[in-house]
Image (cartoon, rainbow, N blue to C red):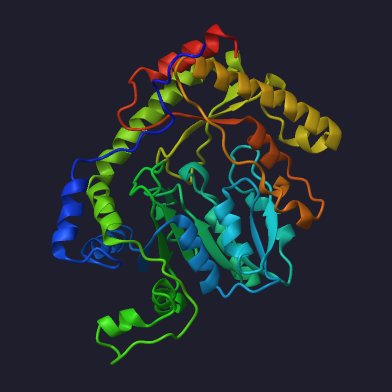
């Protein structure tokens, strides 16, 4: 019988000011959207990261949907995105009738393989949507160069990438648009929540209109027009100021939060590094051009013969690849089970979107061996402020004792 769970995968962090600011929002008499705390949060991001325009949303999903509207996504437009990502990345554009063109992951990291993007570009391509997986930057120079060459938009899915940088540039602030998440599993949280970042002047005015149900209400509040009306499509994307008040309590402590998470991440890395060969796992890879915001710590369960198997995967027959991946997945399942038996919750997540029930009818027969590889083998370890300080050592010992 498994032990009672004593180390959950995630536990939301509170700074201690959340309830005070929520009460203050109530006292101010404005708890609907775009109130005092909404403006404070948006100004924080614009000042700290030099983002041109920030709009809080109820989720990163909403921010992505706003981005899809802003770039005027039409039925038949093609959107290039990784197969190894959360469904929201794809849904935002599928809702506008776009054709999803999936790209495989890198061999050294679950992020999109930037060198495979160009071969997917056609005359119908509208945008590239890189996902900064685990807060680790995609190679944005390569992606922005392709966007310029083929006149494409770039929408950064930076859901996991708050306070992370590419060559000194904040993620979410490089593409034409950027989208963030403040879900309870993220470094900075408001329970649910998100933000659209507008980096292209062409989209600033319209973004406010879409954000406010397709009306020019914000221009009216600023005294720029004498009345407001319905001028475009849109929805109610803005969150309550109560959510923003909670978020503000987190943002005030962002440096402290990031430092504590990085300490836990480094502890994992230093503790697990010596046993990599013994237990046949791969640790996270951080390219030189990217910072690490300690959003997550993952391991990849793999046999020694698969440690550098990027080319090998491509050479395998389809049937043999499926068989080998099934065997490797059993290794990950054993790790999850044994950790659970010791009261530790570890999880896997994304299943390749190209294999989803929804997309199967649209499949064009391409194969994505690396995306499938991560879907079968990647495992996320618990990481949150206040976690058992000996967690890394405990996991290392469990892996070694059970020869996982």
Toward the top, the furthest residue is: 401
Query: Where is residue 368 shown, x and y percent of the image?
Result: 73, 44
Q: Is residue 61 visible?
A: yes
The answer to whether residue 306 is left or right of residue 93 is right
* Residue at horizontal 48 percent and vertical 82 percent from the top: 232
Query: Where is residue 270 shown, x and y percent of the image?
Result: 43, 22
Q: Nearer the viewer, residue 131 or 233?
A: 233
Q: Nearer the viewer, residue 403 or 361?
A: 361
Query: Where is residue 62 shown, x and y percent of the image?
Result: 47, 61
Q: Nearer the viewer, residue 271 or 361?
A: 361
For residue 151, which quarter of the picture? bottom right
* Residue at horizontal 39 percent and vertical 87 percent from the top: 229
Q: How many marks?
A: 0
Query: Where is residue 14 shown, x and y percent of the image?
Result: 26, 40
* Residue at horizontal 15 percent and vertical 56 percent from the top: 24
Toward the bottom, the furthest residue is: 226
* Residue at horizontal 54 percent and vertical 50 percent from the top: 138
The answer to whether residue 143 is left or right of residue 40 is right
For residue 76, which quarter of the picture? bottom right
Q: Is residue 142 visible?
A: no
Where the C terminus falls, by quadrant?
A: top right
Residue 214 sits above or below residue 293 on the image: below
Residue 40 sits above or below residue 351 on the image: below
The answer to whether residue 169 is left or right of residue 386 is right
């Amino acid at each position: 019988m498994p032990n009672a769970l004593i180390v959950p995968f995630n536990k939301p962090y509170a700074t201690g000011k959340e309830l005070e600011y929520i009460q203050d929002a109530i006292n101010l008499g404005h708890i609907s959207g775009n109130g005092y705390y909404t403006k404070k949060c948006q100004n924080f991001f614009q000042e700290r990261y030099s983002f041109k325009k920030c709009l809080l949303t109820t989720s990163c999903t909403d921010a992505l949907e706003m981005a899809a509207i802003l770039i005027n996504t039409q039925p038949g437009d093609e959107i290039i995105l990784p197969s190894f990502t959360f469904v929201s990345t794809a849904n935002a554009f599928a809702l506008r009738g776009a054709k999803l063109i999936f790209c495989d992951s890198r061999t050294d990291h679950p992020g999109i393989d930037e060198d495979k993007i160009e071969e997917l570009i056609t005359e119908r391509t509208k945008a590239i949507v890189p996902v900064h997986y685990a807060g680790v930057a995609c190679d944005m120079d390569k992606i922005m160069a392709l966007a310029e060459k083929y006149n494409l938009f770039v929408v950064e899915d930076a859901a996991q990438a708050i306070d992370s940088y590419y060559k000194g540039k904040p993620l979410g602030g490089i593409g034409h648009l950027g989208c963030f998440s403040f879900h309870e599993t993220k470094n900075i949280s408001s329970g649910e929540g998100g933000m659209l970042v507008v980096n292209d002047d062409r989209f600033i005015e319209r973004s406010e209109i879409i954000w406010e149900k397709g009306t020019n209400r914000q221009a009216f509040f600023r005294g720029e027009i004498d009345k407001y009306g319905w001028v475009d499509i849109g929805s109610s994307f803005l969150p309550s100021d109560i959510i923003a008040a909670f978020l503000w309590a987190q943002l005030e402590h962002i440096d402290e939060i990031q430092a504590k998470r990085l300490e836990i991440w480094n502890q994992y890395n230093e503790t697990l590094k010596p046993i990599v060969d013994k237990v046949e796992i791969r640790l996270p890879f951080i390219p030189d051009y990217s910072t690490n915001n300690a959003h997550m710590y993952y391991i990849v369960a793999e046999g020694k013969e698969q440690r550098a198997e990027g080319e090998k995967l491509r050479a395998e027959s389809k049937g043999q690849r499926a068989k080998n991946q099934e065997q490797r997945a059993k290794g990950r399942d054993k790790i999850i089970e044994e950790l659970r038996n010791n009261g530790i919750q570890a999880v896997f997540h994304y299943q390749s979107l190209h294999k989803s029930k929804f997309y199967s009818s649209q499949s064009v027969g391409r194969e994505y061996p690396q995306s499938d590889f991560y879907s079968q083998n990647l495992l996320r370890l618990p990481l949150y402020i206040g976690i058992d300080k000996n967690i890394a050592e405990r996991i290392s010992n469990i892996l070694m004792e059970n020869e996982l």
